[in-house]
């Protein structure tokens, strides 16, 4: 226990140090942005990229290692998402428990951006090349006592963009408070690390560090669980410069101000809301809402369902299936598929 306490203290010191030196950045200002991709159909259906639900779901541990439990031992999970155009990405995770050391989850993730063509200034095609990002993740977690758990992920990163390559390393650190089987609160520091080698050798770029706080509560007398995620707690203002201006830089027209402008608008950009209706042990129906996504990607004249997501989970025989669809733009939505199985169920008795 003394060793665990020393590890925990060291983790807290690292968190405080990273927050103090943090240069707050959002999407588009970092390298290895694929680390922020949603890795689970269940998480996608609930609207965010991090969920605090303590029910032995291995697909939640890549984003929240403090949820790794011994009950996941010998569990295998596969996730796949088809993005816009030719982009696709996927995850493979496997868990094993060691009684004295804790529980571990190893994951491989990839982001395949498809093939691009070599072309000269005249447009003559001379071949193709591939673009992709890859990561190997090793996660560890264990209970400190009856209500507190901790966990960490170590990530080894590699990016291959034609003749340009980059290597990096990052760590996730998480802690959860679990007072009972229906309630979970988690604090997470994601992607503490750095780019070790840059694409051009001209200097390293930042990794998408983020501080998140999440909680979930399953109701006592209803088959329903609600989830709340507070994202990007390392910075307050998540709006773009164009949002803060009075003239749209693309159209030259005055920017229309909504009733949530100012403090309320900035606060809501940190909030992701999710709900799970569980009418039976084999069935879950999920809904999510991400205000930040809606504000950034909706078309004002036809907002549609941008920012909303939904999904379904089925436990059939020895498999768990999850499917979700999330609307990120009026033109298209993303589809997520996850399949999970505990290999112990396949062992001969």
Image (cartoon, rainbow, N blue to C red):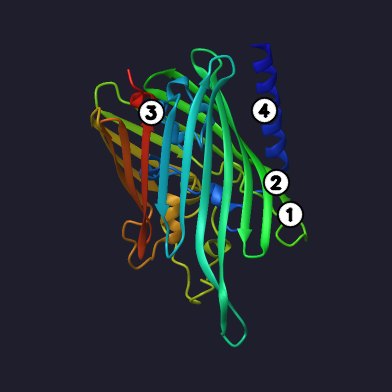
Which label is found at residue 84? none
Which residue is label 1 attached to?
204
Q: Quadrant of the C terminus?
A: top left
Which residue is label 3 attached to?
342
The residue mark sitting in front, 1 or 4, is 1
Which residue is label 4 attached to?
11
Query: In the rendered structure, which disc, 4 or 3, sits on the residue that comes first in sequence?
Result: 4
Query: In the rendered structure, which disc, 1 or 4, sits on the residue that comes first in sequence?
Result: 4
Q: Is residue 52 above or below residue 115?
A: above
The residue mark sitting in front, 3 or 1, is 3
Q: Is residue 9 above or below residue 269?
A: above
Label pair 1/2, CB-CB below 8 angstroms: yes
Q: Quadrant of residue 272?
A: top left
Which label is found at residue 194? 2
Q: Nearer the viewer, residue 197 or 259?
A: 197
The residue that appears at 52% across and 38% down in the rendered structure is: 107
Label pair 4/2, CB-CB below 8 angstroms: no
Q: Is residue 327 above or below residue 232?
A: below
The residue mark sitting in front, 4 or 3, is 3
In the visual, does 253 lie left or right of 119? left
Q: Quadrant of the N terminus?
A: top right
Distance between mark 4 and mark 2 Cα atoms: 17 Å
Q: Nearer the viewer, residue 210 or 154?
A: 154
Distance between mark 3 and mark 1 Cα atoms: 41 Å
The residue that appears at 65% across and 49% down in the rendered structure is: 207
Query: In the rendered structure, which disc, 3 or 2, sits on the residue that comes first in sequence?
Result: 2
How packed mark 3 is, by other alpha carbons closer than 10 Å (few <14, some 14-19, many 20 or more), is some
Distance between mark 1 and mark 4 Cα atoms: 24 Å
How packed mark 2 is, by other alpha carbons closer than 10 Å (few <14, some 14-19, many 20 or more), is many
């Amino acid at each position: 226990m003394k060793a665990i306490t020393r590890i925990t203290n060291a983790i807290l010191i690292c968190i405080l140090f990273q927050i103090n030196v943090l240069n707050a950045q959002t999407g588009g200002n970092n390298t290895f942005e694929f680390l922020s991709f949603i890795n689970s159909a269940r998480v996608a259906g609930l609207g965010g990229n991090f969920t605090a639900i303590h029910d032995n779901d291995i697909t939640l541990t890549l984003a929240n290692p403090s949820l790794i439990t011994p009950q996941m031992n010998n569990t295998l999970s596969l996730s796949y998402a088809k993005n816009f155009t030719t982009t696709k990405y996927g995850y493979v995770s496997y868990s094993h428990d060691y009684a004295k050391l804790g529980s571990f989850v190893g994951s491989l993730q990839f982001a395949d951006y498809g093939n691009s063509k070599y072309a000269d200034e005249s447009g003559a095609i001379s071949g193709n090349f591939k673009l992709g990002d890859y990561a190997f993740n090793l996660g560890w977690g264990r209970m400190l006592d009856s209500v507190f758990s901790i966990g960490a992920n170590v990530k080894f990163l590699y990016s291959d963009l034609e003749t340009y390559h980059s290597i990096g390393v990052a760590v996730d650190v998480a802690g959860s408070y679990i007072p009972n089987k229906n309630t979970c609160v988690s604090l997470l520091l994601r992607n503490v690390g750095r780019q070790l080698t840059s694409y051009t050798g001209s200097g390293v770029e930042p990794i998408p560090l983020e501080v998140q706080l999440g909680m979930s509560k399953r109701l006592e007398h209803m088959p329903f669980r609600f989830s709340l995620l507070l994202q990007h707690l390392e910075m307050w203002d998540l709006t773009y410069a164009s949002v803060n201006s009075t003239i749209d830089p693309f159209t030259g027209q005055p920017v229309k101000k909504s009733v949530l402008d100012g403090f309320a608008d900035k606060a809501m950009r940190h909030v992701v809301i999710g709900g799970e209706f569980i009418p039976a042990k084999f069935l879950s129906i999920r809904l999510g809402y991400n205000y930040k996504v809606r504000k950034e990607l909706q078309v004002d004249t036809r907002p549609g369902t941008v920012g909303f997501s939904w999904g379904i989970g089925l436990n059939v025989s020895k498999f768990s299936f999850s499917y979700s669809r999330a609307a990120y733009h009026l033109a298209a939505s993303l589809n997520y598929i996850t399949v999970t199985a505990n290999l112990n169920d396949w062992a001969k008795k």
